[in-house]
Image (cartoon, rainbow, N blue to C red):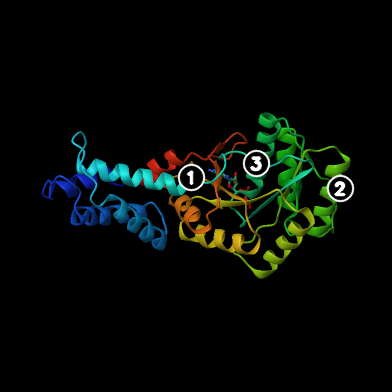
Amino acid sequence: MFENLSERLSGVFDRLTKQGALSEEDVKTALREVRVALLEADVSLPVARDFVKAVQEKATGQAVTKSITPGQQVVKIVHDALIDVLKGEGEPGTLKVDNPPASVLMVGLQGSGKTTTTAKLAKRLKEKDGKRVLMASLDVNRPAAMEQLAILGAQIGVDTLPIIAGQDPVAIAKRAKTQAGLGGYDVYMLDTAGRLSIDEELMQQVEAVRDVASPRETLLVVDGLTGQDAVHTAQNFDERIGISGVVLTRMDGDGRGGAALSMRAVTGKPIKFVGLGEKMDALETFEPDRVAGRILG
Ligand code: GDP
């Protein structure tokens, strides 16, 4: 579908005069192509612009290596710079869940894959880290969502907090915390309600739950196929709630993963995991180099 960046750049450099170093003009011309490639990969415009500017400063004046073409050289510089932005602090794929019972707060918009990801992470914590996990759904407006978590819990062998009709999210969070302590659980995961878009009521609700649970991790679940929207969502949740990391879902789809770069650049928060399908095992540690390759096409 897309012409990849290497092909594009070799075309560009074929038209330029060969020199001993990458001139400002060469780099500028090449980076116009890079910018288009980033936008096609769904990177948001301001992030693409800043990124290209930073790369321009880095690339100008670099000696052209004999063994590779100038096009390949710019691709390498861009690739390395992408990895620099995508890499967060800490080990990707790890969660701070020591000192039981540790809470993990799952936040995000409706349909982002929050409930599925909650269960996937619970399964991973149980199987990889040997943790005893309790999951609770706080989505009081959608009984089907609460049922969904219970069904997934049964499927993966992870306990869910019994559903009591009529309780509000804060009451459920308190009950989960108490139950986690009494029941000897290492981790309790709170699957908060989502909305189709961010609204004040949702934010107040999540804030109240956060204050009760004092989460060790607050993970924002975002659909990796949404470009610019993902950035707004991440910015909003981070400003109001304070997130500790991001899980990007639907990375098994056609998307090029530009949302990863945008969110990392805008929030500075690490992307910890990626969702790669509907199945309970379809969750992987975020790999910056793989996503960088995908963004470049
Ligand atoms: P929530 O409303 O945010 O809780 O979203 P759900 O967890 O109910 O997920 C919505 C739909 O997306 C479900 O059909 C999931 O199976 C699907 N889904 C979740 N994560 C992924 C993923 O990584 N890849 C794909 N292809 N589908 C996913």
Disc 2 is placed on an element classified as: helix
- How far apart are the two marked residues, 3 and 2, measured between alpha carbons? 21 Å
Amino acid of disc 1:
Lys
Q: CA distance from mark 1 to mark 2?
A: 36 Å
Mark 3–mark 1 distance (CA, rounded to whole Å): 16 Å
Who is closer to the viewer here, 64 or 116? Answer: 64
Sequence-first disc among 3 and 1:
1
> Type of residue at label 3?
Leu
CB contact under 8 Å: marks 3 and 2: no
From the top left corner, tell me how far across and down residue 284 is, in percent. Answer: 55, 36
Camera-near label (3 vs 2) is 3
Task: Give the secondary structure at mark 1.
Answer: loop
Q: Which mark is residue 95?
A: 3
User: Vertically, is 180 above or below 36?
Assistant: above
User: What residue lies at 29% left-to-right and 55% top-to-bottom?
Assistant: 56
Say which residue label 1 marks: 87
Which residue sits at x=37%, y=43%?
80
Question: CB of residue at label 1: within 8 Å of ligand 1?
Answer: no
